[in-house]
Amino acid sequence: MMLAHQCSARAYLATFVTIFLIILFLTANRLHHRSPALAHLTEGKAASDPSQHNIDRPSKPPPNESSKSDDEDSIDGPCNRAVRFLRSDDLGLSNTIQYSRRCIRPIHGDVDREEVANVSSPLITGTTVLDLDGDCNRIALPPCEPLTLHVPPAYPPQQGQYGHLIFGVASSHDRLRDALPVFSHWLSGSGAQLVAVVSDADSPDHTYDIAALEASYRKHNISATIVRPRLKESLPRVDTPDDAELSRPAAVEQLHFLLIEDMLDAATPQTQWLGVLDDDTFFPALHPLALALGQHDHTRPRWLGALADNWVSMKIWGFMAYGGAGTFLSVPLAGQLRPHLRDCVRQSKIVSGDGMLKECVYAHTTTKLTLVEGLHQHDIMGDPSGFFESGRKTLSIHHWKSWYHAPVAQMAAVARVCGDCFLQRWRFAGDDALLANGYSISVYREGVDKLELDRVEATFRDPDAKFDFVYAPFRPKLGPDKKKSFRLEKVDGDVERGERFRQVYVHRAPREEGSEPVDEVVELVWEV
Ligand SMILES: *[C@@H]1O[C@H](CO)[C@@H](O)[C@H](O)[C@H]1NC(C)=O
Ligand SMILES: *[C@@H]1O[C@H](CO)[C@@H](O)[C@H](O)[C@H]1NC(C)=O
Ligand SMILES: *[C@@H]1O[C@H](CO)[C@@H](O)[C@H](O)[C@H]1NC(C)=O
């Protein structure tokens, strides 16, 4: 980008070509993201993403079943839950690991969440080599040195508190099936309704059991209504030449926009907000989201959401609520739009559902977009750590299983222990480690004190000025020689049942032929 001193024609051409390619890439991605075709492509990834499996499945059965100690509270016996957890298949650790653990005693109270708290001792202590492959009775976990951390209080229990919210999503059967564990994280037991339109339910190539899909959601205590599309084929749009888009089944973008109708039908007198989501919109917790929505008058027409976080997208699609961040309509606004919905599809010049919504709101109401701080469209690609390690709070997370990969449900699970402590940060003296709670432990080899920790590390692709209006200021990306990262990969423990909550942070050793990899693991065991 810094071409000031080399103004050759080639440099200009290169810049032009680069910008053109970026726009092309973003356009393709955005359109694809909405299209069922790509949905099928990304499905495989989602299905094989180990982070999606919440269940602790021991891969290698303990050698002596009768000696298995299943005591939830004993973390030191042989072949107990802690050891089986480390040996589980979906974690896939190397046979030999370098392991250390800390037992965290959270002290709940008022904390300044913006601050990076200082701990005057190292985080990673008592590292031991463990042979996970061997006889489980010989695996001796090192002592769990206590660590006191000041954290916010836990959020109030979900117990049906969010009956005033309805969420809507339109997606393929398989993507909805795969999304269940992640939806479950924030929806289960909340009392909020989920209305899901299965975009390919009427596809001639498949027979899908929609009732079974709904039953699986209900089994997770989600008030789900899962339905076939009421639109059987796409509506013709003015902007489309010929019948190019008259597809059967109807385009998922149109179904996404028409969710407003499905949600209004599901609404009760209690309903305040209709949340239109992408199938990869994730909320770390409903409590702060409901507080943020509560700042707005749901009895008036209101349109709430977030912009894209990339100025290139803004220039292409304009000023609107970008769907992936989560868009919220008050019931009165949805009511004003209702009679016009199908005409809005026919008149739309933008293919995406969020674009149709923008055009429809402008064409038929005087309501304008209100931005809600903390909702994020996350148009960031590659390595998102700069964002997640920046201490920024986030009400929503998006693109986590396509543009970048992050095990969001596992990451945010710590919110059950200490609410807003998700992504809270601590700096440790002695080992120059930084804990970004639920995301990573970073060890800064040249010292953590030299870093401007309130800046976003420029880790993701193309972190230049087009992101400034959301993420600035940045600091330079650090290579692996300067920063060693342990990423959260898996958690265990049911906090509601009073079980200890474990976070496993892993620094993967390269898998190279001819050498045994040794992964490095730091486990944080939260006392609850
Ligand atoms: C299994 O463990 C129990 C209890 O530690 C022990 O009594 C028993 O002999 C063991 N059985 C085998 C087959 O090793
Ligand atoms: C932590 O230590 C750093 C460096 O010594 C200092 O700049 C910062 O203000 C301290 N933070 C708090 C919350 O005390
Ligand atoms: C299911 O959710 C409701 C709130 O919608 C809650 O009252 C109930 O306790 C939950 N049931 C179970 C078994 O968790």
Image: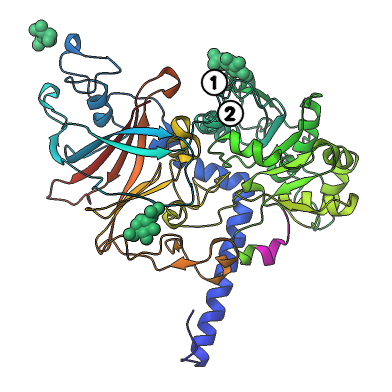
Residue 213 is situated, as x and y percent measured from the top left of the image, at 59, 23
Please identify, in this view, whether the residue under mark 2 or under mark 1 is nearer the observer.
Answer: 2
Residue 372 is situated, as x and y percent measured from the top left of the image, at 67, 49
Q: Secondary structure at mark 1?
A: loop
Q: Quadrant of the C terminus?
A: top left
Residue for badge 2:
187
Which callout, 2 or 1, points at the residue further toward the start of the chain?
Answer: 2
Residue 257 is situated, as x and y percent measured from the top left of the image, at 75, 43
Closest to the observer, 51 or 122:
122
Would you say residue 419 is visible in this rendering?
A: yes
Residue at disc 1, CB closer than 8 Å to ligand 3: no
Closest to the observer, 205 or 511:
511
Q: Are marks 2 and 1 in contact (CB under 8 Å)?
A: yes
Which numbered circle lies on residue 205?
none
Tell me if 220 is positioned left or right of 345 in this view. Answer: left
Residue for badge 1:
220
Asked if residue 525 is positioned above or below residue 496 in the image, the reply reads below
Q: How many marks?
A: 2
Would you say residue 49 is visible in this rendering?
A: no
Q: Secondary structure at mark 2?
A: helix
315 is within the stretch colored magenta: yes
* Amino acid marked by disc 1: His
* Amino acid marked by disc 2: Leu
Q: Residues within 10 Å of mark 1 (few under 14, many from 20)?
A: some
| Residue 333 lies in quadrant | top right
x 54%, y 61%: residue: 471
Q: Report the span colored magenta.
A: 314-320
| Residue 438 lies in quadrant | top left
